[in-house]
Amino acid sequence: MFYDEEKNLRTFKCHKTRTGKLSLWEFGGAIRHFASATLIATPKGKKPEAVFVTTKNNVNSQHALVLVRKDFIIAWGQERSGTVNICLYVVQKLNKDKGELTALRVNELYHGVWAYPVEEPYVEVVAALQKKLKMRSCRVPIYVKIPKKTLEQIK
């Protein structure tokens, strides 16, 4: 991961699907005094559809693979000893050749203080991220729609 503070840009390494599309994992959860998580949302802040959902050996790990597109929202958070930090990014550019995307940081919560008031598209995903940061030994995705076909495979 590369972070350019002057431009508020961050490069995320992506997973490439078999069809060559870029995707990111929803992952994370809490253990003792530490938690971290990443969630992906549509441009309107709603749940995206999962491409793949893990069901085994995924405690606080990768839970759902989500295709990413331009303008999708990436919410990253970390909690350490009660202090929560959250960064909200909006995908600006996809680079399929390098398998990465560039996202613009649009807001952040640092030691309990938001840089800007949280706007409507981000409210729901921030609430879901905070929920995931509190889940001990998280084994399930929190903020994705799971297609019926995938649900049948899980059961």
Image (cartoon, helix red, strand yellow):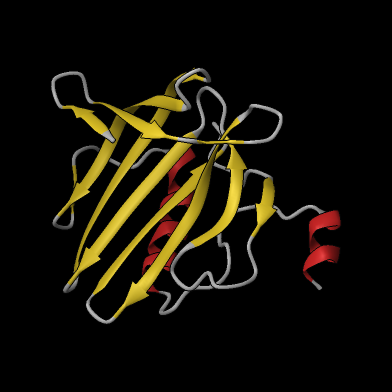
Q: Quadrant of residue 44?
A: top right
Q: Position of residue 10 (x, y in %)?
A: 29, 29
Left or right of 5? Residue 25 is right
Using the image as rendered, state which of residue 48 and residue 52 is in the foreground: 52
Q: Position of residue 49 (x, y in %)?
A: 68, 45
Left or right of 112? Residue 130 is right
Using the image as rendered, state which of residue 9 and residue 109 is in the foreground: 9
In this view, 56 is above or below 153: below
Q: In percent of the image, x 25 and y 71: which residue is there?
A: 34
In this view, 57 is above or below 145: below
Left or right of 81? Residue 43 is right
Q: Position of residue 18 (x, y in %)?
A: 69, 34
Q: Can the viewer see residue 130?
A: yes
Q: Can the viewer see residue 120?
A: no
Using the image as rendered, state which of residue 1 and residue 9 is in the foreground: 1
Q: In percent of the image, x 50 and y 25: which residue is there?
A: 71
Q: Position of residue 42 (x, y in %)?
A: 57, 36
In this view, 116 is above or below 80: above
